[in-house]
Image (cartoon, helix red, strand yellow):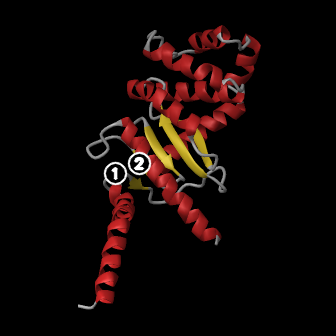
Amino acid sequence: MTKNTIIKKTLQATILLVLMPFVFSSYGQIERYVAGTHYLEIANPVNTRDSSKVEVIEAFWYGCSHCFRFEPLITNWEENKPDDVDFVRFPALWNNLMKIHAQVYYAAEVLDVVDVLHEHIFNAINVERNMLQNEGQISELFAEHGVTQEDFDRTFNSFSVRTKVNQAEARMQDYGIRSTPNMIVNGKYLITTGENVRTQQEMLDVVDFLVEKERQAMRSSGD
């Protein structure tokens, strides 16, 4: 073996050693989360509200203790999300009480007080055991945090709020939501905790993985 051949092989081996961590890291990222195991592909993708961004939806219920515990995690995630991610809260509903709570959320949204009331609604139900199951209980909570009775009465049973509730009910089937909390990425992927996604933090890790997957797909389609 000539001196040049030895040098060449040594250089090749050195380059391989340098590149191997990047290669395995890349494959690891690709294989880390798998459709059908860590997330489900939605059969008929649902349109997002802003096609220029990657949409991430949190499907929640105010009466869900798992959602209550998830709230600090999702709040931190929202505060640190990239600018190209559009975060949307989605009140799940499959019974009458959940429908009332969805109405509570959308009334707060129309009144532009979600940021003020969201945590208090969770606390009322999960800590104070006030199930907010009638208008009297709900209006009292709204009043405690600055919403006048007049504004509440004008909004709670308004056409706008009722429409939002009906639209959410229709989308439940589109997303395939059967539990809470669930996450939906770009109207295409449904993530929930279970056998293969054991913690709420891992659910958010899957969300981040799918956000990057969608981000790359959007870049490729724009080229």
Residue at (55, 20) in percent of width and height = 119
Can residue 34 be seen?
no
Which sits in the foreground, 196 or 171? Answer: 196
Q: Is residue 110 left or right of residue 91?
A: right
Where does label 1 land, which residue? 38
* Dot placed on the residue nearer the N-terminal end, 1 or 2: 1
Find residue 26 and report its horizontal and vertical position in percent. 39, 62
Residue 8, above or below 64: below
Residue appearing at x 64%, y 20% in the figure: 116
Disc 2 secondary structure class? helix
SS label for mark 1: loop
Looking at the picture, tell me which residue is in the foreground, 115 or 188. Answer: 115
- For discs 1 and 2, the disc positioned in front in the rendered view: 2
Q: Vertically, is 114 above or below 35?
A: above
Residue 137 visible in the displayed image: yes
Asked if residue 84 lies left or right of residue 195, the reply is right
Q: Quadrant of residue 178?
A: top left
Quarter the N terminus occupies = bottom left
- Residue corresponding to mark 2: 206
In the rendered structure, are the residues bearing label 1 and label 2 in contact, judged by CB atoms less than 8 Å apart?
yes
Against 35, residue 3 (above or below) is: below
Q: Quadrant of residue 34?
A: bottom left
Q: Which residue is drawn at the image coordinates 38% and 52% (left, top)?
A: 39
Considering depth in this image, is 150 or 32 the residue closer to the camera? 32
Name the amino acid type tagged 2. Val
| Residue in the picture at 58% in, 34% down | 79
Q: Is residue 214 above or below residue 78?
A: below
Residue 146 in picture, x, y percent from top left:
71, 12
